[in-house]
Amino acid sequence: MFKIAAQVTFSNSLPYLAIVLGVTTTAAIISKRWWQRHNTYKPLQLLPSPPKHWLLGNIPQVLTAVKQKKYFQLLFDWSQQLGPMYVHWTGFPVLVLSQPKVIEDTIVNGMKDGSLVRASQANNAWNDIIGPILIGQGGAQWQWRRKAWNPEFSSSSLTKYVEVIELACEQAIDTIKETSPPKEVQVDPLFVELTMRVICTLILGIPVDKKSASHEGPPLEVLKVYEAMSILSYRFLRGFTGEKKWQKYLPTKNSRDYWAARRYLEEFITPRVDLALQMRSQNKTDLTQISPLFQASMLVKIAAKEPKYNQQTLVAEVVALLLAGTDTTAHTLSFAVAELSLNQKVFQQAQAVVDSAWHQGGISLETLKELTYIHAIIKETLRLYSVASGSTPLEATRDLTIAGKLIPRGTKITWSMLAAGRDSTIYPQSGEFLPERWLDKSTHSPLLMIDFGSGSHRCLGEQLSIMESTVMLALLLRYFDWELVNGRSSVEQLQQNLLIYPSDKMPVRFRQRR
């Protein structure tokens, strides 16, 4: 009887023993992995780090900053508190750099010798926006895509678009002139429309003139396209900072917004992609119903010369190029307009330079080359307000040394361009807006300009952005004086979707010059 009772008791205890054994095994595995991770990243424990939760590390601060659209501001604040090199912990260590020379050397040398690659988490987040895109690729896949697009964005190729850019800028000028007095205009949305119309003309062959129709696909509705792109870019930021791919399938507002935005952009772009692919397959034999502007578009050229592209990858690539070609230049222009208003000496000198160029024949390829002071204003704006402040981190493929510190393999590496632009050892009087610093020939080593990246991965659209910004600023300076409606708060109250932008949309009061 006692034997039977013992057997029953033992039998009943088996599930509990199994649970205990499972919990113990799991705890042992977790402890082992934690210990291995701790030893691997032990050198990073010696670097400064923001206060963190004992279990979650810095995940709560990062997620809160993303939700508040202040992620880059958080990296900047930590850089100011902790110095030019620190680590934050979000399930894995992230090394943050904020010295311009260290950032440039790290990017160029690391990607050249293979010791640094784009972090897989960032690549996955990029490719999860709408499909596989150039910036989310590596190795041979990246090389053939970059090689296909490089010629289209070269300086020589872009010169033929000066008239397109000037027309888009003149439409923005007309919008300001038509505004009822007092002429207060939110310039950030105005510049978004400008840059979007230009990039849609170049990529998709959509007329830059608002009054002209495009028959190759749905019309360009700037506000709707921009809202959809903003939702997708915010999706990237959430994905990069920890949100999982499967979360987009949950019945949440973010998920519903994401799928609606993605569907809208696909419906806008796909007919044009399909037409370009049809022209490729038919060898352009029937073009009577297709506009010359679409025939000359980058989309048609790329589809014709690169057979590896298909509908999915071309749609995704176009979305990425529209994202990259709109916000970056638009927000930079907004900050340039703000700083000109806040620095009247710079404003007056810039107007004098533009007036002189006008006496030589207005906007042309030749006069654009002469507007070096305007170029310096753009560079100085990017120094203070780098709108894309380190959004594509790298990952160490082996142990390496950065600024004399041992960085273990597997460490994620990013940078705060907001902090780098305020490095007083590189940029004396770093808090002041001094375009002249970019024109100073007295030094043998030119100032670092790394806002467009470095090396082979340097920004594809750098020349286009400079050209658009120069023409727009020149026209504004020629026709108007202006002041910020909200004063300096417009450049202090910033938010971030994927890029940094003025939260008040930068309202400006314009006065037409006599």
Image (tube, grey):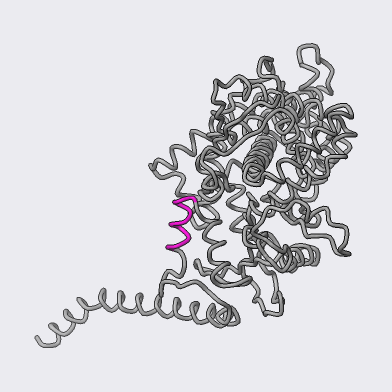
> Residue 101 lies in what quarter of the image?
bottom right
Confirm whether the magenta stretch covers residue 68.
Answer: yes
Residue drawn at x 86%, y 30% as measured from the top left = 364
- Asked if 301 appears above or below 465 in the picture, the reply is above
Query: From this viewpoint, is residue 320 visible?
Result: no
Q: Residue furthest bottom?
A: 2
Residue at x 46% of width, y 45% of height: 248
Say if 466 sits above or below 67 in the image. Answer: above
Residue 277 vs residue 407, the one in the foreground:
407
Q: Give coordinates of residue 219: x percent, y percent.
A: 62, 20
Instruction: Tell me which segment is drawn in magenta.
Output: 60-69
| Residue shown at 53% from the left, 32% from the top | 263
> In front: 278, or 99?
99
Please tell me in which quadrant of the rendered image residue 347 appears. top right
Measuring from the top left, give residue 454's x and y in whole percent. Answer: 77, 57
**Magenta stretch: dominant secondary structure:** helix
Residue 167, horizontal then vertical, whole percent: 75, 24
The residue lying furthest to the top in this view is: 288
Residue 496 position within the rendered picture, expressed as x and y whole percent measured from the top left: 54, 48
User: Viewer-proximal residue, 22 or 282?
Assistant: 282
Question: Which quadrant does the C terminus fall into?
Answer: top right
Q: Tell me, yes or no, whether the highlighted magenta stretch contains residue 16.
A: no
The quadrant of the picture occupied by the N terminus is bottom left
- Mark count: 0
Q: Is residue 156 visible?
A: yes
Q: Can you tell which quarter of the image residue 112 is in? A: bottom right
Foreground pick, 135 / 282: 135
Q: Is residue 339 above or below residue 172?
A: below
